[in-house]
Amino acid sequence: MHSVSVKNLSLNFGAVSVLKTMNLDVEEGEFVVLLGPSGCGKSTLLNCLAGLLDISAGEIWIKGKNVTWAEPSERGIGMVFQSYALYPQMTVRGNLTFGLTIAGLPKDEIEKRVARAAEILQIGPLLDRKPGALSGGQRQRVAIGRALVRDVDVFLFDEPLSNLDAKLRSELRVEIKRLHNQLGNTMVYVTHDQIEALTLADRIAVMKGGVIQQLADPHTIYNKPTNLFVAGFIGSPTMNFLHGKAIDGGTAFQFGDHRIDLSGYDGGAVGNREAAVLGLRPEHITVHATAPAGPSLPAEVEIDENLGADSLLWLKLDGQSVCVRVPVEGRLPSGTKVHLGLDIAKASLFDAASEQRI
């Protein structure tokens, strides 16, 4: 039995199709991240799971129960919103206990749940403060705590860290992962931040235009993207794309006047293709003073961007810009002529017409 199942779900706003015949199964205790650009439908899907939006077609199952038309309170979920949504006139304790009190839980049970949530989230000293006296990170902990005290099996997170600064986002990201490891509850998490997705998820559902483009573990999503959209969306900086064609029965890639040997490519049968795209992550390209053994291309250094732990080299290659991640030592001045070694075993090859991975 899946913890959460979405079956042939569609959602239309008038004539506009927002979610298109979507299917998604989330296993018990799994951390699934819905990732995509603004407007792709990820928060809309989460609101459908929560019961905040009525779907146009399909079914939603939670813990083996069809909850398609159930009220939010009957779905057995706890939701954490982007905007915290705390009651400003109540203390932290009041925010945590309000829903439980309305539900009629015994006082001792409420106190036990609040104490447990406060210990897990380290907000014990904040219980008598009001939200206005808390930092952004503390407010988000309280918002998570309010979901936690409901003692449910499925937690839904709608971009909970997007209002925080970079340092707090990093800290709370670790805490959310620690929380999942500790509780083992099923979590569905919405974000447009690929770092959050890659670090938190057991599996990532990359969305575009109301459709899941790829659903897989972070390693597969990053190293074997299913199409050009996923390849370009995941990774910072993005994957480098070389536009050319597959020749010699698919054993080589023609890029301008350069022939690149594809014999080490870890993919399907390539064959001859008049239009193809070779994708390489910045860390899968090496920089050499002279042409190395194996596939390589001549280039010229344009910008050396020092990031502290390493550097990003931006190079000109036959009129297009290519990014390479290199050690910070031995910086290269602009205009330096170099040769780029290509790790074809870790490359991605796409059909230019269908944009699908070969």
Image (cartoon, rainbow, N blue to C red):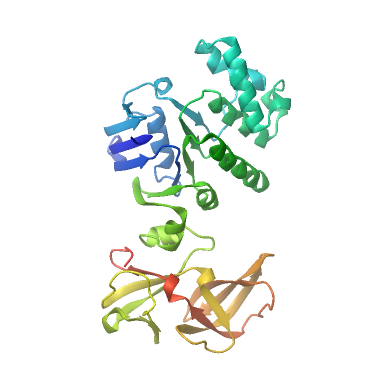
Image height check: is 111 above or below 341?
A: above
Q: Is residue 56 visible?
A: no
Image height check: is 194 above or below 144?
A: below
Please tell me in which quadrant of the rendered image residue 275 appears: bottom left
The front one of 54 and 246 is 246
Q: Residue at x 59, y 28 (%)?
A: 145
Q: Residue at x 69, y 22 (%)?
A: 127
Q: Is residue 314 visible?
A: yes
Q: Position of residue 347 (x, y in %)?
A: 42, 71
Q: Position of residue 73 (x, y in %)?
A: 43, 20
* Total marks placed: 0
The front one of 319 and 115 is 115
Q: Residue at x 41, y 37 (%)?
A: 28
Q: Position of residue 45 (x, y in %)?
A: 39, 37
Please tell me in which quadrant of the rendered image residue 261 appears: bottom left
Q: Residue at x 42, y 58 (%)?
A: 220
Please tell me in which quadrant of the rendered image residue 277 appears: bottom left
Q: Quadrant of the C terminus?
A: bottom left
Q: Quadrant of the N terminus?
A: top left
Image height check: is 90 above or below 292?
A: above
Q: Position of residue 285 (x, y in %)?
A: 52, 75
In the displayed orientation, state which residue is furthest to the bottom.
Answer: 290
The front one of 288 and 105 is 105
